[in-house]
Image (cartoon, rainbow, N blue to C red):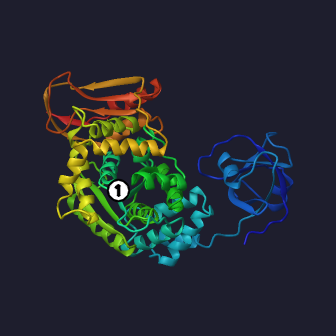
Amino acid sequence: MEHAHGNTLTLRSIGIDTYRENIIYMRADCHICRSEGFTALTRLVVANGTKSIIATLNVVHSDLLRHDEAALSTEAMHRLGVAEGASITVSHLEPIASLSLVRAKIYGRELSDEDLSAIIADVTTGRYSNIELAAFLTSCAGNHLNERETIGLTKGMIASGLRLSWGPGPIMDKHCVGGLPGNRTTPIVVSIAAAAGLTIPKTSSRAITSPAGTADAMETMTPVDLGLDHMRRVVEREGGCVVWGGAVQLSPADDILISVEKALDIDSEGQMIASVLSKKVAAGSTHVIIDIPVGPTAKVRSQEAALALKQRITAVAAATGLHAEVVITDGSQPVGRGIGPALEAMDVLAVLRHAAGAPKDLKERALTLAGALLDLSGNFPPASGATKARQILESGQAWKKFLAICEAQGGFTEPGMAPHQYDVVATHDGVIRSVDNRRLARIAKLAGAPRSPMAGISFHAPVGRRVRKGDLLFSIHAEARGELEYAREYMQQENGTIQYD
């Protein structure tokens, strides 16, 4: 247990945003720091009444605070539920036993279900600092989680939060493992499935290492930060939703881990499987389609790797009670034209509206996945899903359902265009031979995506296209001129983003 010593300070608000990490600020010569031996980066228990959080100490060597004052980061104040002037007590945090398990994993020991549950429990309650979270994530990276450990991690994440129930099934879901710019099929698939009468309460993530996640793209068109009660009303009314999973606390440990994964720019296989499937089970899903794009610059590079990942996903899903079907797709180039939240949303709308010039590759990929989802449900004649999905999309039923879902989530808004643009054109005649997905994604992120929702890339150079000197290959979009220049300079330094001859 943590020991509260009656060390009381008055809280002062200083308005410092530390993202997801709880930080407490105290004077170095504060009587409590001196008597308790607190130093910078000490982990402390901070309490107000019966509520407490764990925070990392930052030491102040100035008159920013009085001797009897402490300050908390804005996130820490929110989590503790306090305002300026409140009284808080601070005390030592006892050693975290599960950190010995992390150290064991670093040295190659296999972790049991109980070990992983202990780690996830401590992560969820905020006991791990970002440094300790990074150590755990790194110990599991590079495929250092075997199948048994991945199952244990998934179960631990499921147990860390809420688990929804939607009544009699099937309850459908869809996910892509990522690594491919564009590829924003989820809003289209959800609209088709819901229009077909299926229940599909889709919780989506924000970007981890990509220029946009589904939640980022959807947020340019409708609110996604819905609480659980609002999410339930949407699903009960329309049969489906597309909301940010972090708002409904379905797998809170995963949201914490993702925030550090994003900073480290890592997304290991075992962590990814546990992340995806824990949220599917927690969301109440019973049947899920998993899309694995394969390509030389995608997250999954070879057919062999895709088949191995498929086997691992299927095994973990079965162990957690999910019916999962994996679809392996082409990941050699971006899907659609937009790369970045608003630009990807425009592609989604073009497909749903059946607009002239809508990206055909995005439409056909969404229909493939939607057809597989309809077949997996068992609610339709065998092998009829693809035909049914196309009829729903091309008749306008999916568009009507998408609008209805957006209205139920809080209203529909057309995504906007960024004010700054730079066109990249062909320097000679040729045929597009290859596209580097990772470099395109990097350019889009340097332009501001996803933090700036209208930033990103409009892509116009699919493999096989014949170009002449001066033809448009892609356009960089930015909300700030400085970010446009930053992305442009990187692009000019990097050769081989698009190969043509």
Q: In this view, does 28 lie to the left or right of 97?
A: right
Q: Which of the two residues, 456 or 372, is positioned nearer the viewer here?
A: 372
Judging by the rendered image, the residue that carries numbered circle 1 is 175
Determine whether 93 is above or below 495 in the image: below
Q: Residue 59 versus residue 260: which sits nearer the camera? A: 260
x 76%, y 63%: residue: 50
Residue 346 appears in the figure = yes
Q: In which quarter of the image is residue 183?
A: top left
| Placement of the N terminus among the 4 image quadrants | bottom right
Q: In this view, does 135 lie above or below 357?
A: below
| Residue 246 drawn at (x, y percent) | 51, 53
Q: What residue type is labelled 1?
A: His
Image quarter of the C terminus: top left
Front residue of 255/446: it is: 255
- Which corner quadrant of the image does residue 327 belong to? bottom left
121 left or right of 215 in image: right
Residue visible at 60% across and 62% down in the picture: 128
Task: Name the spot of residue 374 as percent of width and height, x first.
Answer: 26, 59
Q: In which quarter of the image is residue 273?
A: bottom left
At x 59%, y 51%, the residue is: 20
Which residue shows up at 54% across the image and 67% down it?
160
